[in-house]
Image (cartoon, rainbow, N blue to C red):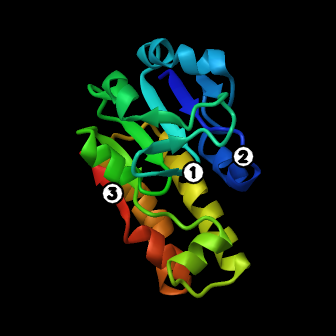
Amino acid sequence: MKRLVIHPKDESTLFLNQVYSHLDNVTLVQSGVEELRNLDTLIAAHDQIIFLGHGMQEGLLSVGQFGYHTFVMNAARAHAIKDRVNSVFIWCYASDFVVRNDLRGFATGMFISEEIEAFANGVDCTEAEIEISNNAFAKALGEALQRNLNTLDLYNHVKHQYAPLAETNPVVKYNWELVEGIL
């Protein structure tokens, strides 16, 4: 399977490298105006598209890596992945973006990955709990992708590996309640 990973360069999301670091046949896009211009062509040439980073309901933020463009993926580009059923959308409020644009795949809701996000969402936690959550989620998702699971099985694998930590980790508890396998 050929995978396109769109993961804008950002120190605060380095933990997400675990999602794709052990996958074969990956094209990684982290920055560049030319890459953004050719994104529809890149999407068409790959079997699965994985979006990782910071975002909002309107899409995946470029975090300054793609010229003056605010988003790498937004409603104007959603047509390129409309027929995909196995896309992966990991950013804050990605599930809202997916539903709003009638897309399919595995998506996160508001996902706490930094201390300021925990504070803003009223989650009392330590930096260590955030780090444990980040690494456990990225590892579980990466393992599921290595196994080439369909969206439902991918969701169940991540649930089995990540969700049990919710009993002792308030960040995992918050994050898991907002993860969706949108079929």
Towards the viewer: 84 or 147: 84
User: Which badge, 2 or 3, comes first in the chain's sequence?
Assistant: 2
- Front of the two marks 1 and 3: 1
For label 3, the SS is strand
Q: Residues within 10 Å of mark 3 (few under 14, many from 20)?
A: some
Judge from the rendering whether residue 68 lies leftward or rightward of residue 85; answer left or right: right
Q: Which mark is residue 180?
A: 3
Which residue corresponds to the image point at 58% horizontal and 70% vertical from the top-left? 117
Element assignment for label 2: loop
Q: Residue at x 54, y 13 (%)?
A: 38
Q: Position of residue 40 (x, y in %)?
A: 45, 17
The one nearer the camera, 181 or 174, is: 174
Q: Amino acid at mark 1?
A: His
Percent of width and height locating residue 130: 65, 73
Q: Looking at the image, which residue is at 50% across and 67% down?
A: 162
Label 1, residues with CA under 10 Å away: few <14, some 14-19, many ≥20: many
Residue at the disc numbered 2: 10
Dots 2, 1 in contact, CB < 8 A = yes
Label 1 residue SS: loop
Q: Residue 164: tell me if it is visible.
A: no
Q: Which amino acid type is shown beneath numbered disc 2? A: Asp
Please tell me the numbered disc located at residue 54. 1
Residue 139, relative to residue 126: is it above or below? above
